Amino acid sequence: MKLTEKMHHWFRVPQPLTRKRMLFALVIAVGADGLQLLLTTIGWLGPNQIIDVVTMVIVSRLIGFHWLLLPTFALELVPFVDDLPTWTACAIAVITLRKREQRNRPPTPPLPSPKPTIEI
């Protein structure tokens, strides 16, 4: 498998974007933001970067990689900004963009019906 094929596989957008995938991506994003906020209020400087990496990978696999995920990942490294629900906002934005893309995509033409075979 070529490198470009491997990258295309990692950055592909799942078709179609199902309600289950969207809901699971939102649950992961909200959970990551909540866990990071909880760890910050406790005063434990925990594995926030590990949470960010895992969240980015899981959300990317569920709803497809989008360039909005990169600034969100970078914002999580900034003190005090990382307390904002950036993963949740990003997941909502990406889901909205993906749904708009699917809605604007032209419908696929129906497959031609197979011709009947006549046996003699």
Image: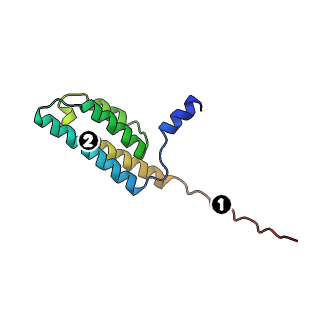
- Quarter of the image with the C terminus in it: bottom right
Q: Is residue 56 above or below residue 26?
A: above
Q: Residues within 10 Å of mark 1 (few under 14, many from 20)?
A: few
x then y, percent, for residue 56: 35, 37
Q: Which quadrant of the structure image shows residue 107?
A: bottom right
Given the image, on which type of amino acid does mark 1 rest?
A: Leu
Relative horizontal placement of residue 68, taking residue 104 as reference (left or right): left
Question: For the residue labelled by badge 1, is the local secondary structure a helix, a strand or a loop?
Answer: loop
Q: Secondary structure at mark 2?
A: helix
Q: Is residue 118 visible?
A: yes
Residue 115 spot, x, y in % from top left: 76, 66
Q: Quadrant of residue 51?
A: top left
Q: Is residue 35 above or below residue 23?
A: above
Question: Within the image, what quadrant is residue 31 found in?
Answer: top left
Task: Single out the residue that lies furthest toward the left.
Answer: 42
The structure residue drawn at horizontal position 38% and vertical position 55%, both measured from the top left corner, is 20
From the image, tell me which residue sits under label 1: 111
Which residue was labeled with disc 2? 32
Q: Is residue 1 above or below residue 27?
A: above
Which label's residue is closer to the chain start, 1 or 2? 2
Identity of the residue furthest to the right in this view: 120
Marks 1/2: CA–CA distance: 43 Å
Residue 11: percent from left, percent from top: 47, 38
Give the residue displayed 53% in from the left and 36% down from the top.
8
Front residue of 13 and 3: 3
**Where residue 17 sits: x, y (%)?**
44, 52
Looking at numbered disc 2 in the image, what kind of residue is underneath it?
Answer: Ala
Mark number for residue 58?
Answer: none
The count of marks equals 2
Residue at the image point whose x is 19% and y is 28% from the top: 79
Badge 2 crowding class, 10 Å Cα cut-off, few under 14, some 14 to 19, many 20 or more, is many
| Residue 84 in view, yes or no | no
